[in-house]
Image (cartoon, helix red, strand yellow):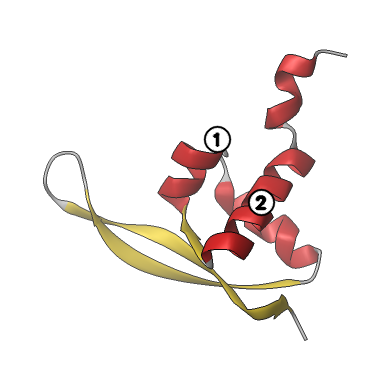
Amino acid sequence: MNTDDEPLKTPNQCYRLKAYLSAMGSCTSLEARRLLDILEPASRICELRKQGLSILTIRIPVIAANGGTRQVAQYILKTGGLAK
């Protein structure tokens, strides 16, 4: 087994994203990519929702490298964290 690929596996990504959301309350798609090394954060959010977490998605503007603005997803862990 190649352990170099271990951090890229879906369960590890879900664990990192869940821990970040629990600690910080929210995470943008850019933060997930840059800080957590998750290339497809929307897919991991879907997996966490299937596990029962209640996560709200909103679109927020950010300043792009060219100085313009663009919309990114912000994922917010709802109070209590579990879907009802």
Identify the element where label 2 is drawn: helix
Q: Residue furthest right?
A: 1
The answer to whether 15 appears left or right of 65 in the picture is: right
Neighbour class for label 2 at 10 Å: few (<14), some, many (≥20)?
many
The disc label shown at residue 60, or none: none
> Which numbered disc flags the more N-terminal residue, 1 or 2?
1
Measuring 81% from the left and 13% from the top, which residue is drawn there?
2
Indicate the position of residue 37 as horizontal and vertical percent values.
55, 35
The answer to whether 40 appears left or right of 34 in the picture is: right
Disc 1 residue type?
A: Asp
Give whichever of 51, 43 is nearer the camera.
Answer: 51
Indicate the position of residue 34 as horizontal and vertical percent values.
45, 38
**Vertical position of residue 48 compared to residue 38: above or below:** below
Neighbour class for label 1 at 10 Å: few (<14), some, many (≥20)?
some
Identify the element where label 1 is drawn: loop
Give whichever of 30, 40 is nearer the camera.
Answer: 30
What is the CA distance from the residue labelled 1 to the residue labelled 2? 12 Å
Measuring 66% from the left and 51% from the top, which residue is drawn there?
44
The answer to whether 43 appears left or right of 35 in the picture is: right
The disc label shown at residue 37, or none: 1
Which quadrant does the C terminus fall into?
A: bottom right
Residue denoted by label 2: 44
Indicate the position of residue 69 as horizontal and vertical percent values.
19, 55
Disc 2 residue type?
A: Arg
Camera-side mark, 1 or 2: 1
The answer to whether 58 appears left or right of 64 in the picture is: right
Measuring 68% from the left and 59% from the top, which residue is drawn there?
46
Which quadrant of the structure image shows residue 59? bottom left
Give whichever of 8, 68 is nearer the camera.
Answer: 8
